[in-house]
Amino acid sequence: MIRKFAMLATATALFVACGSNVEEKATDTMDAAQETATQTMDQAQTTVQDAAAAVDSTVNAAVDTAKQAAGEVIDQAKEAVK
């Protein structure tokens, strides 16, 4: 019976000794994953902001072109009526 208890105590001691290292490694891994996720989200935000700026610029250029074309058509119509 004492042998079984000694084996159980030894196994428990090994489990506790190894378990703390596993917990530390898991914490380190989770911290690294969190850092990577944060960096990825920051890069995604920058990419989205750049894309939004490009779309805004393109839309503004299209609106300016449409205004210019409409102005030219109106000017031509005015000239035709005179």
Image (cartoon, grey):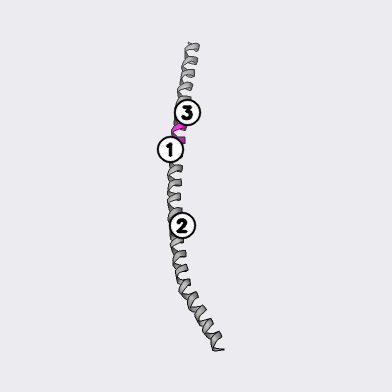
How many angstroms separate mark 1 from mark 2 (CA)? 30 Å
Give the crowd class for mark 1: few <14, some 14-19, many >=20 residues within 10 Å.
few
Q: Quadrant of residue 56?
A: top left
Give residue 34's position: percent from left, percent from top: 45, 57
Tell me if mark 2 has few (under 14), some (14-19) or many (20+) residues whose alpha carbon lies within 10 angstroms of its own.
few
Which of the two marks, 1 or 2, is nearer to us in this view?
Answer: 2
Looking at the image, is 25 positioned above or below residue 67?
below
How far is the residue under mark 3 from the one under mark 2? 43 Å
Examine the residues drawn in magenta and state their main secondary structure.
Answer: helix
Residue depicted at x 47% and y 28%: 62
* Relative to 75, residue 51 above or below: below
Residue density around tag 3, few if under 14, some if 14–19, many if 20 or more, within 10 Å? few
In terms of depth relative to the viewer, which is nearer, 12 or 67? 12
The magenta span reads: 53-63
Q: Which mark is residue 53?
A: 1
Residue labelled with disc 3: 62
- 67 lies above or below 81: below
Residue marked by disc 2 = 33
